[in-house]
Image (tube, rainbow, N blue to C red):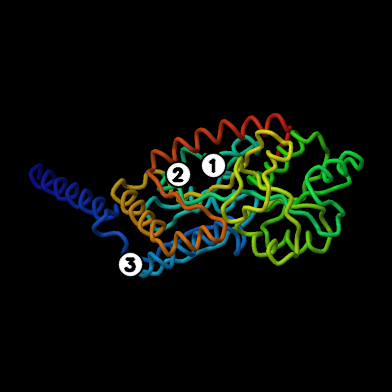
Amino acid sequence: MKKLFASLLTIGLLVSVTANAQSKPNSLTWPTQPIRIIVTFTPGGAPDVLARVLAQSWQESLGVPVLVENRPGFGGNIGAEMVAKSDPDGYTLLIGTVGIHAINGALYEKMSYDPIKDFTPISFLASTPNVLIVNKRLGVNNLHELIEMAKTKPNQLTFGSSGVGTSLHMSGELFKEMAGVEIRHIPYKGRAQSLPDLISGRISMLFDNLSSSLPLIKAGEVQALGVTTLKRSPAAPDIPTLAEQGLHGFEATSWFSLMAPANLPVAVQKRLNALTRQTLNNPQVRNRLLEGGLEPAPGSPKELTKLIQSETSKWSRVVHQSGAKVE
């Protein structure tokens, strides 16, 4: 009986080990089912564009469906939480943002996930300047005139963003602090809701990704007053920076990354990183993104981790200095 029990125990352990090994994806077996890329904003913005570029490329090379799902709300927290609590098997991925991984932790009193510990970094994807655009009927032609108007009308002007905690929201908070003005923040779920309100005059101004607003700026539907990077964007060299117009040192860049749930097998992490590099380094893809105001720069997981640490430190200071808080 003891021998039989020992034999059964050995067989059970072998079956358990084998099943466990088979359940963990590796670079040879992955992928065998559809992949989902979660975007935490509405369609049409920079993160959505990047997700669809990756999805199209991967679907062609991997031979499995690659689906893009938009899960907007709460500064990206809804979609981010969903990914953080998914199985770490490489089939549910997230377009990470500076808001999700470097701002929300300081901004929200309570978080249902850890923006650092609950994710596996895959690769940096791209960055884009933010741009300050105003309603054409506001009656200002440059940043100086806007600041003067805001000082004479405290809390009467409004600025929109694609959500609380986004780099667009924080661009506005940084602007308020450095310009010494009081303007009210109006958060939206995404640019699809905020831009019509800007054009109609329901809000005075909007911080948006340059890549998203560029078509409207070129069409003359909105007026661009400045970009939020220290240097002018090659995609829009005629738009001055906020820094060169008097807000010295003003810098706020929107960046996007590819993330997976924590504890993703290293083999799958490496495969996803290689696929991302292959896609974004493709000359045609790269040129198309650059023309649209996005600057692709895929890199290593270690480089992405260092960026997140640096940006978390920077934006935590801005959040605390501005007094911004979300319950």
Q: Amino acid at mark 1?
A: His
| Closer mark to the observer between disc 2 and disc 1 | 1
**Residue plotted at (68% across, 64% down):** 218
As drawn, the label of residue 101 is: 1
Q: Are marks 1 and 3 in contact (CB under 8 Å)?
A: no
Give the image location of residue 294, x and y in percent.
Answer: 54, 55
Front one among 12 and 119: 119
Front one among 200 and 179: 179
Lower position in the chain sequence, tag 3 or tag 2:
3
Residue density around tag 1, few if under 14, some if 14–19, many if 20 or more, within 10 Å: many
Q: Amino acid at mark 3?
A: Ser
Residue named by callout 3: 61
Decide: is 294 above or below 308: below
How many labels, in total?
A: 3
Q: Are marks 3 and 2 in contact (CB under 8 Å)?
A: no
Residue that lies at the very extreme toward the front in this rendered image: 238
Lower position in the chain sequence, tag 2 or tag 1:
1
Q: Quadrant of residue 221?
A: bottom right
Give the image location of residue 204, x and y in percent.
Answer: 82, 53
Q: Quadrant of residue 19?
A: bottom left
Give the image location of residue 195, x and y in percent.
Answer: 73, 61
As drawn, the label of residue 119 is: 2
Q: Amino acid at mark 2?
A: Phe
Q: Quadrant of the C terminus?
A: top right
Q: Are marks 2 and 1 in contact (CB under 8 Å)?
A: yes
Residue density around tag 3, few if under 14, some if 14–19, many if 20 or more, within 10 Å: few
Q: Quadrant of residue 149?
A: top right
Secondary structure category for the residue under label 1: helix
Secondary structure category for the residue under label 2: strand
**Residue plotted at (85% across, 47% down):** 157
Give the image location of residue 324, x and y in percent.
Answer: 72, 36
